Amino acid sequence: MFLTGLHLRNFRGYRHLDLNLDPMTTLLGQNEAGKKTVLRALDIFFNGSAAKRPLKLQDLNQEALDRGDWEIAISCTFDQLTVKKVFDLKNYLAEKDYFREKTDEAFQEVNAGTLSRYRALISSLPLYVFFDEESKATSPLNFVVRSAIRDKRQEIKEVQDFLDARVGRNLSQILANYQELAPGPKPNFVFKEQNLADLIKQQTTIEESNLQTSSQIVLAFMLAQSENANIENVIYAFEENNLTKEEEDKLAQAALKLVAKGKQVILIPHTPYLMGLLPLEGARMVKQVAGQREFLQEEEVLEEAQKNLGVEADRRAVQSRCVLLVEGQEDVRFVTKVNQWMYEAGLVDQTFSQKGLFILPVGGCGSLISWLNFDLFSRLNEPWFIMIDSDKGTPEADQSRRHLRRIENKYPQNKSHVHATFKREIENYLVFKEDGQVLKFAPYEDVKLHMYNLMEKRHRSWAKDKTASKLMENMTLADLQDHYQRDGQDHRELVEFFLKIDHFMDQLP
């Protein structure tokens, strides 16, 4: 049974919220935008007082409080079934439950006449598992225990119905009265299944001292679940924090594998890289609209992502005819400068700017994967090229190569338009000229760090992020270190790539 929709009323930052959910849903937005509020609301809906943060008076929306509206409502829709929980904060968080089995029906209140039917319906609801930065080592094991108990849900319902019929009160009322009359030792529940009893004992004895971040705990759990997901009808909800790119790769693979196995995943990613690994379908972005928080969906998300990734119409030159995607502003300056040198040397008849090439900084390969998954390349409506740092000599090199291969495989007609630098990055093609001396750099060394350390020894300041701009100030095209040998002939890597773009633009109508 899939969760297809969530409605919130007066919960925390949301006066009203309607959110559609997919098998794989990613919640995007700035910090404190209200993404985790959605996960916490679902935790309260599914787990009640056992939620990580049970409902409290402070959860009432401020505007609702000012207007004297003291009710919080959390509604979840599953296929045709909708269940609504309403909490009256004026009456000590008293809860009333409602349900409807068809979307066009009125809600029925859960009472003595509808209780048995309601229990039968909710016995099929998914198990909701929520992990965040506060999750501890016991959280994954807690899930196993809860899933084992969930398997006994039908038996528990039969016991509840039997007690209701014989006593006229529900089980929770009986236990509450028992505790009021006999404070002290609570009754012990004995589990016949020894493995379940062992799990509960283990939960209290897990050592947490050897564990790393909560996200790494969740990652290990998700990987295990994706390989051995034999527990049906589960929603995995979690917030990602402080993972390496390699770990984010694994997390994305595990999440997608769980979805493929019929599970549901709701994820809050915190890096553009992880966002780019997940499909556009199911992406939701929270934004302030007319003073209210709303989740943008589908095309609205795409438009907002395009803006965040640099595609804004007002940034483009009017005469733009082709796009070159690079990493950052230093790369824009680098391409512009080298192209200017080529123009001054008579290698081209016009500069890129004059011919209508728009140089767009998009970030590294991680952001390009976002472009791939959001299919922003096809939405440029113009021919495009990519020049990206290869990161050779760094741990990221293999990953960058894989990402570029994915782009080439999806757009084979543009394979010759994608260029990864032969050297580590653009700074490795430059030289440092001072007092008649020329310092050249090794192909794979960290030039930014090299120059920073050199200037520090000379008691001079040096901004690492402006290394390329500073080095190019005293250079010419002849100084550019892009020469290489092939078939016994001298070639110029970057000059030839820029000539390819220039010749391509000459053929455009």
Image (tube, helix red, strand yellow):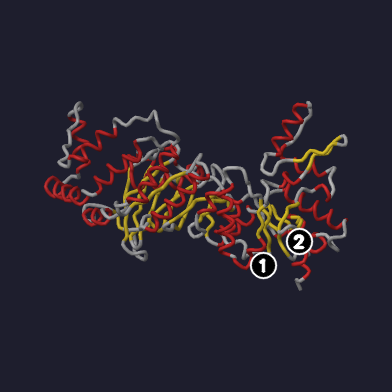
The answer to which image quadrant residue 104 occupies is bottom left
Is residue 187 positioned above or below 497 on the image?
above
Residue under numbered circle 2: 357
Q: Report the residue at 63% width, 46% height from top.
A: 391
**Going by the image, does 82 lie left or right of 380?**
left
Q: Residue at x 36, y 55 (%)?
A: 263
In the image, farthest residue toward the front = 488
Quarter of the figure with residue 205: top left
Q: Which residue is mark 1?
A: 381
Pick the front one: 347 or 250: 347
Say whether residue 464 is left or right of residue 296: right
Quadrant in the picture for residue 352? bottom right
Q: Amino acid at mark 1?
A: Asn
Q: Who is closer to the viewer here, 18 or 220?
A: 220
Where, quadrant-wise, is the C terminus in this rendering?
Answer: bottom right
Decide which of tag 1 and tag 2 comes sooner along the chain.
2
Q: Is residue 357 left or right of residue 182?
A: right
Task: Give the side of residue 221 with respect to residue 189, left or right.
Answer: right
Q: Is residue 440 visible?
A: yes
The x, y position of residue 409, in whole percent, is 56, 63
Which image quarter is the N terminus in?
Answer: bottom left
As drawn, which residue projects farthest toward the bottom?
A: 509
45 or 149, nearer to the observer: 149
Residue 447's spot in the image, x, y percent? 71, 39
Q: Is the Cβ of the residue at disc 1 closer than 8 Å to that at disc 2?
A: no
Residue 195 position within the rendered picture, expressed as x and y whole percent measured from the top left? 20, 40
User: Mark 2: which secondary structure?
Assistant: strand
* Structural crowding at the residue carrying mark 2, measured as other residues with C-alpha within 10 Å and reported as few (<14), some (14–19) or many (≥20): many
Using the image as rendered, state which of residue 315 and residue 47 is in the foreground: 315
What percent of the width, then of the height, locates residue 158? 16, 51
The three-letter amino acid code for the residue at tag 2 is: Leu
